[in-house]
């Protein structure tokens, strides 16, 4: 059973370009979470999705950031018109149920975005 | 989400037990306490979680205070591979982590 797969592992974008980060959850998992980790900081929740639904996007910046988890295919975190401050590691996690219930979340290896 | 407080760093010797504390005084009565760890350049890895009772698994033990305002992650015999940043978090799916505790294991 493959773990949570994120790609690309490293992404370099120039200011103003778009960044697309992909996450394939573990097989059978229908809950996906995106997190951002800035250098020397802890993990910050961004968005929680289930198939075709955004459940909670309270941690996502209001502009330039969007996320989706379509019926088929991976979850996508999209950052438009990237700026230097978007440089960070972005982690995706998946779970069978909501992690407030008695379950654990499995994390991917992350995508390290560098904006130059 | 519960606000958590952990020491910035701790040090241990190989093969010795390690007790990693976490204060989560604002945790609600129904929130689980989760522990994750993160090795350099890796994603966080689940360690253990619990609600009220102490919990054991193959990786660690979790001791939860009776008032649930604090918990302690116990690594019974630290190995070099246990060197990581350990995060505790209480709350729901948001699993927001603070800066965690950097555990150094000396050979």
Image: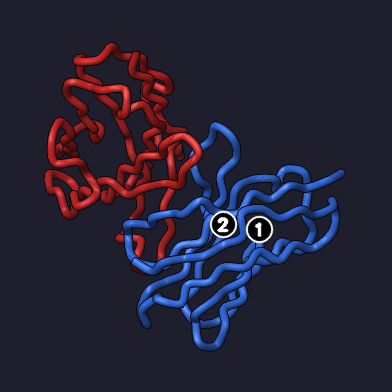
Chain colours: A red, B blue
Q: Position of residue B26 (x, y in %)?
A: 40, 76
In the displayed structure, A60 sits above or below A78; it is below
Residue occupied by mark 2? B47
**Taking B66 as reference, is A80 above or below it?**
above
Identify which residue is drawn at 37% across, 23% down: A113
Q: Which residue is mark 1?
A: B59
Q: Residue at x 29, y 28 (%)?
A: A22
Q: Residue B50 in the image: x percent, y percent?
A: 50, 72
Determine contact: label 2, label 1, CB under 8 Å: yes
Cα distance in 3D space between marks 2 and 1: 7 Å
Mark 1, chain letter?
B
Q: At 13% across and 35% down in the image, what residue appears? A: A63
Identified at 24% across, 32% down, the residue is A77
Q: Is residue A83 left or right of residue B56?
A: left
Percent position (x, y) of residue A64? 15, 31
- Secondary structure at badge 2 equals strand
């Amino acid at each position: 059973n493959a773990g949570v797969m994120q790609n690309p592992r490293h992404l370099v974008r120039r200011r103003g370009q778009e960044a697309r980060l992909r996450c394939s959850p573990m097989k059978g998992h229908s809950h996906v979470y995106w997190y951002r980790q800035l250098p020397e900081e802890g993990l910050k929740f961004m968005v929680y999705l289930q198939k075709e639904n955004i459940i909670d996007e309270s941690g996502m910046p209001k502009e330039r950031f969007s996320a989706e988890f379509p019926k088929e295919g991976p979850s996508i975190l999209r950052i438009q018109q990237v700026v230097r401050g978007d440089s960070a590691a972005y982690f995706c996690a998946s779970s069978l149920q909501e992690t407030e219930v008695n379950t654990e979340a499995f994390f991917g290896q992350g995508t390290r975005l560098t904006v130059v | 989400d519960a606000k958590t407080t952990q020491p910035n760093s701790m040090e241990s010797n190989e093969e010795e037990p390690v007790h990693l504390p976490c204060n989560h005084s604002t945790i609600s009565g129904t929130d689980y306490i989760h522990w994750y760890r993160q090795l350099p350049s890796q994603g966080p890895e689940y360690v253990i979680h619990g609600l009220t009772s102490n919990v054991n698994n193959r990786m660690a033990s979790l001791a939860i205070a009776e008032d649930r305002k604090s918990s302690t992650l116990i690594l019974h015999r630290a190995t070099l591979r246990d060197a990581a940043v350990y995060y505790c978090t209480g709350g729901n799916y948001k699993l927001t982590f603070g800066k965690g505790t950097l555990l150094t294991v000396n050979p």
